[in-house]
Image (spheres, helix red, strand yellow):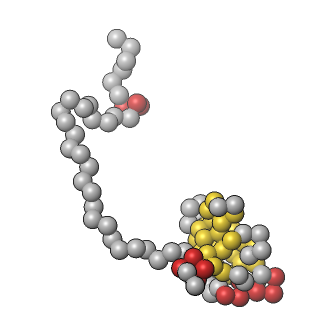
Amino acid sequence: MNVEEARHIRSSSELNVGDQIEAWHNGKLFHRGTVTQTVAAMDLFWILDSRTGTRRLIDVEALVILRAAEPGPARAATRAPARTPSQPPHMPLFQAPSLSG
């Protein structure tokens, strides 16, 4: 059994409140979030979508449900290139000096 197969959820009865899931359709991530409630008899469950902050009803038969991947080992932070004096600092347009002579 590969890792992807082990993450696959086939029924809402396999989930518990607090589980982290991803809901995919046609190879695209539609929802990611925390399970808030399950209805095993109807194979439905609700999540709090981490991208939008909204509550979503998820149908196990309509989407491919995967347990969210565990975070990998921390990567070393990469340093951003130093800003050279020739590059002007970023200034939002509404704070920029007047452009009308």
- Tell me if I can see residue 12 in this picture: yes
User: 95 or 75: which is nearer to us?
Assistant: 75
The percent coordinates of residue 96 (x first, y second) are 35, 28
User: 5 or 66: which is nearer to us?
Assistant: 5
The percent coordinates of residue 16 (x first, y second) are 62, 87
In the rendered image, the quadrant that contains the N terminus is bottom right
| Outermost residue, left side | 85
User: 30 or 89: which is nearer to us?
Assistant: 30
- Tell me if I can see residue 57 in this picture: no
Give left or right: position of 73 versus 8: left
Q: Quadrant of residue 24?
A: bottom right
Give left or right: position of 45 versus 16: right
Q: Number of labelled discs?
A: 0
Q: Quadrant of residue 45?
A: bottom right
| Outermost residue, top side | 101
Where is 86 relative to 32, above or below?
above
The percent coordinates of residue 50 (x first, y second) are 56, 66
| Outermost residue, front side | 1
Tell me which residue sits at (36%, 20%) in the image. Answer: 98
Give left or right: position of 30 versus 78: right
Where is 69 relative to 15, above or below?
above
Tell me which residue sits at (76%, 78%) in the image. Answer: 44
Where is 99 relative to 21, above or below?
above
Tell me which residue sits at (59%, 68%) in the image. Answer: 32
The percent coordinates of residue 71 (x first, y second) are 43, 74
In the rendered image, the quadrant that contains the C terminus is top left
Q: Quadrant of residue 60?
A: bottom right
